[in-house]
Amino acid sequence: MPDEILSHISPGHSDNINFFGVINVDVEAELAKLDTSGWRPLRPAQLRELGLTP
């Protein structure tokens, strides 16, 4: 495949991409983060941007 085409379809930076590994997710821990409505809490930075922190 020519480099001109490959440059458009491959990631420019792949250092943070795990092509051959397995991602383990603790489903129970993630579900425990949800509130009673099923939503995850906002991050502190998002709260500051919304003016919801003192």
Image (tube, rainbow, N blue to C red):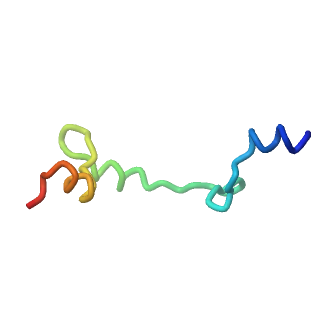
Looking at the image, which residue sits at the far front? 4
Which residue corresponds to the image point at 82% horizontal and 42% vertical from the top-left?
6
Please determine whether, in this image, residue 39 is positioned above or below residue 53.
above
Q: Residue 7: horizontal and vertical position, in percent?
A: 78, 44
Q: Position of residue 4 (x, y in %)?
A: 84, 41
Nearer to us in this view, 28 or 39: 39
**Up-down: is 1 above or below 12?**
above
Q: Is residue 11 left or right of residue 5?
A: left
Q: Residue at x 62, y 55 (%)?
A: 22
Q: Position of residue 13 (x, y in %)?
A: 67, 56
In this rendered view, identify the residue nearer to me: 1 or 33. 1
Q: How many marks?
A: 0
Give the position of the C terminus as an image quadrant. bottom left
- Residue nearer the viewer, 9 or 22: 9
Q: Residue at x 53, y 56 (%)?
A: 24
The quarter in which the N terminus is drawn is: top right
Q: Position of residue 2 (x, y in %)?
A: 91, 40
Q: Nearer the viewer, residue 7 or 24?
A: 7
Picture quadrant where residue 43 is located:
bottom left
Q: Residue most toward the left? A: 54
Q: Quadrant of residue 37?
A: top left
Asked whether, in this view, residue 34 is left or right of residue 26, the answer is left
Identified at 66% across, 62% down, the residue is 15
